[in-house]
Amino acid sequence: MADGAIFNHETVTLDGEVFSSCEFRDCRLVYSGGEAPVFQDCRIDDCEWKFEDAAGRTLVFMRAVWGAGGKAPIQGLIKEITGGGGK
């Protein structure tokens, strides 16, 4: 667990980590599809998101669904993620 840490111009692996009151500045944030990270009261500024392994394959799959005419399911997932899904 990182508590109150400041990450500046670093590569940070996110899988399974808990970040509390942390700041991320100009970092590369890497998620590989493992246990989801937890962000509690964190600030993320000008960071690059990198999705590798299972996470990257999930994005490739979603692009394929979108390109095959499956825009509605992908848009539904986006609404669910952003809280606009009505659930």
Image (cartoon, helix red, strand yellow):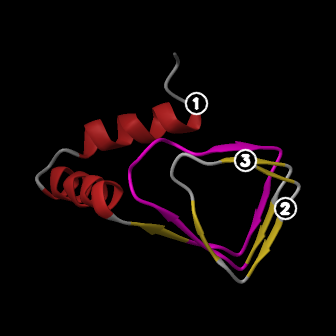
User: Taking 81 as reference, is 27 above or below it?
Assistant: below
Three-letter code for the amino acid on which mark 3 is drawn: Met
Q: Quadrant of residue 4?
A: bottom right
Q: Which residues are magenta?
A: 26-48
Nearest the viewer among 81 and 8 is 8
Q: Quadrant of residue 16?
A: top right
Write down the residue under mark 1.
83
x and y percent of residue 26 in the render?
A: 71, 80
- Horizontal side of 36 relative to 64 (left or right) equals right
Residue positioned most to the top: 87
x and y percent of residue 2 in the render?
A: 77, 53
Query: If you read the primary sequence from the N terminus, does the residue marked by circle 3 or circle 1 appear first?
Result: 3
Q: Residues within 10 Å of mark 3 (few under 14, many from 20)?
A: few
Write down the residue under mark 3.
1
Question: Does the segment drawn in magenta span residue 39?
Answer: yes
- Horizontal side of 77 relative to 73 (left or right) equals right
Tag 1 secondary structure: loop
Nearest the viewer among 58 and 66 is 58
- As measured in the structure, the alpha-carbon distance from the residue carrying label 1 to the one carrying label 2 is 28 Å
Residue positioned most to the bottom: 9
Residue 5, numbered label = 2
Residue positioned most to the front: 1
Which residue appears at 71% of the width and 75% of the height?
Answer: 46
Which residue appears at 58% of the width and 30% of the height?
Answer: 83
x and y percent of residue 44 in the render?
A: 74, 63
Three-letter code for the amino acid on which mark 2 is drawn: Ala
